[in-house]
Image: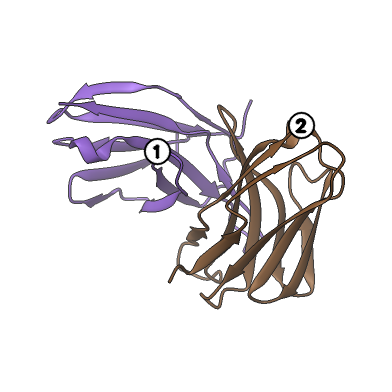
Chain colours: A brown, B purple
Amino acid sequence: DADVTQTPRNRITKTGKRIMLECSQTKGHDRMYWYRQDPGLGLRLIYYSFDVKDINKGEISDGYSVSRQAQAKFSLSLESAIPNQTALYFCATSDPPGHLQETQYFGPGTRLLVL
Amino acid sequence: RKEVEQDPGPFNVPEGATVAFNCTYSNSASQSFFWYRQDCRKEPKLLMSVYSSGNEDGRFTAQLNRASQYISLLIRDSKLSDSATYLCAFQGYSSASKIIFGSGTRLSIRP
């Protein structure tokens, strides 16, 4: 079984609809992240959470919100979807910090198309 | 200046060739560096971390040049299976620092 799962894997929605993307992890990591990936722009951070009570905005948080329901679950919501939110969305978790370098583990991604 | 810059490619090289590409970063406080590999329509996966003294993992060699603020990835004896997009990433010194990713370099190995 995958350590980081995302649902749905693909979604088509219409402008103005509310949509939620879900992420679950079995790695026991405290840190979780949401990224979007667009061609030529690489991975851009939307929101991140260092523990259940900690939520932080990333570089492109406008139009998005998140919920950290438990250590293992981190959901991303688009309150009112718009076409330029069409992208590939990745959830990730990471090892706790320390003297070791922090590795990020990604889920398989959710392809979202907003019409 | 962007925080991290990569040549998007594509690099198109024959099987067996040696290929190298760089990634420059603007934040001199960056302390941790990485190369991730992303196959088409898949998630990125860590290829290797980059250490100050340089490090090697089989056919892959990573180097860090702090003075010029770039990291490099060298692939020797390239295989068809090396075709992918390679993302560089870096992180600041603080434990609260986020990891910043480059936009990726696309590599295509031809038979």
Q: Can the viewer see residue B106 in this picture?
A: yes
The residue sitting at 50% across, 62% down in the picture is A102
The residue sitting at 57% across, 52% down in the picture is A9
Q: Amino acid at mark 1?
A: Tyr
Secondary structure of the residue carrying tag 2 is: helix
Q: Position of residue B109 (x, y in %)?
A: 23, 28
Q: Amino acid at mark 2?
A: Pro
Q: Chain of mark 1?
A: B
Q: Position of residue B27 (x, y in %)?
A: 60, 40
Q: Is residue B68 left or right of residue A90?
A: left
Q: CA distance from mark 2 to mark 1?
A: 28 Å
The residue indicated by pointer 1 is B86
Q: Can the viewer see residue B51 in this picture?
A: no
The residue indicated by pointer 2 is A83
Q: Is residue B41 left or right of residue A36?
A: left
Q: Is residue A107 left or right of residue A32?
A: left
Q: Quadrant of the N terminus of chain A?
A: bottom left
Q: Is residue A45 left or right of residue B47?
A: right
Q: Chain of mark 2?
A: A
Q: Do tags 2 and 1 sit on the same chain?
A: no
Which of the 4 image quarters holds residue B8? top left
